[in-house]
Amino acid sequence: MKELSNKLLGGRQGAVGLAILALLLLVVFPLWLDLFRLGLLGKYVTYAFVAVSLVLLWGNGGILSLGQGMFFGLGGYCMAMFLKLEASDPVSTKIQTTPGIPDFMDWNQITELPWFWLPFKSLPLTLVLVLVVPTLLAFIIGYAMFKRRVGGVYFAIITQAIALILSILIIGQQGYTGGVNGITDLKTMLGWDIRTDSAKYILYFVNAGLLIGCMLLARYILTSKFGMLLLAMRDKEERVRFSGYDVSNFKIFIFCVAAMMSGIGGAMFTLQVGFMSPSFVGIVPSIEMVIFAAVGGRMSLIGAVYGTLLVNFGRTMFSETFPELWLFLMGGLFIAVVMFFPDGLAGIYDKYARKFNVSGIASKYVAKFSKKAAKMIGEKYE
């Protein structure tokens, strides 16, 4: 039991770090932020799924993917297709030429629901497809690339090209995907209105809970024998291959796990924000997600989450104040981190904070604050 706990939490320091993050996400921010800002935070948390997946893939596996946005988008589109079908019942769409199909299909003179939309009439099947579709695409790409020993910068460029192709394909097939506008006007999930204030609170907590679950899974993978092999493959791939291991299979597996996590983030994005569009599939969002992991620390699961939140809060702040400059600021931030802090925020913490036993001090404050927060929440909902 203790061994399992150590694998999931990463020892005392990892447990304290995860407890602080959980406390911030589940208690401090919901109590401190208004609903609008909490909704923004929920959107940032969905990006953190991708950042965590990049820690597995890039930080520990040495596989830089510049196309994680396509897996995020596929998960989001799967959820959006289910929600859109529910919003397109024959009564709500009776003014259309063909009632019972999404409005953008009717505008494009499609008179019958395409076959690949049919599975999304079922929520359980949709939830399965949120996991399966990104994973399947990752398996096809990974099998085609890793079995031929394609890696490094070539793999990064190919994933970028595939992300671009997918976004162009989605935009070009407007009648089936909603085109450049994406899938919008999403209202309910099994009759539950996801636009209400209470729904937004619930979805935020589900989102944060799933992120912590993904972090525990990632930690378990990294502390297992497979995690050690990942590090060995990153540093000395040929030695691992000569030791008798099939390196390509390990790479395919971790690429699929990273794609699945990104897909979960995409599905939660659709539920939190209420739409999905090709602007979250292409090259730009994929590179931004790499920046999130780089700023937080590509070797640290917790650092990647903080990096995602920090960069996105900065982007919101700068885009509100200096809308024409924020892209330059973001590029400058990435260059500065790569040049001066290659291990990101996590590296700075490791270099300075450990000297002062910050985790020990923090654990005492976490325990005290948890008691106070539990009391505040109890009083708030009495």
Image: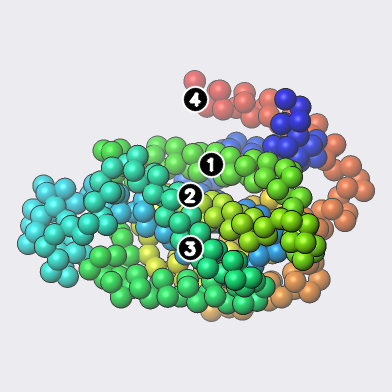
Circle 2 Cα neighbour tier, 10 Å, few/some/many (<14 / 14–19 / ≥20): many
Label 2, label 1: how many angstroms apart (C-alpha)?
8 Å
* N-term mark: 1 or 3: 3
Circle 4 Cα neighbour tier, 10 Å, few/some/many (<14 / 14–19 / ≥20): few
Q: In this view, does 90 lie to the left or right of 2?
A: left
What percent of the width, then of the height, locates residue 51?
61, 57
At label 4, which amino acid type do we have?
Tyr
Dot label at residue 140: 3
* N-term mark: 1 or 4: 1
Residue in the foreground of this view, choosing between 73 and 144: 144
SS for callout 1: helix
At label 2, which amino acid type do we have?
Ile
- Answer yes or no: is residue 307 visible: no
Label 1, label 4: how many angstroms apart (C-alpha)?
24 Å
> Label 1 near label 2: C-beta < 8 Å?
yes
Compared with residue 232, is residue 8 higher up or lower down, i.e. above or below? above
Q: Mark 1 points at which residue?
A: 210
* N-term mark: 2 or 4: 2
Label 2, label 4: how many angstroms apart (C-alpha)?
30 Å
Q: Name the residue under label 2.
A: 264
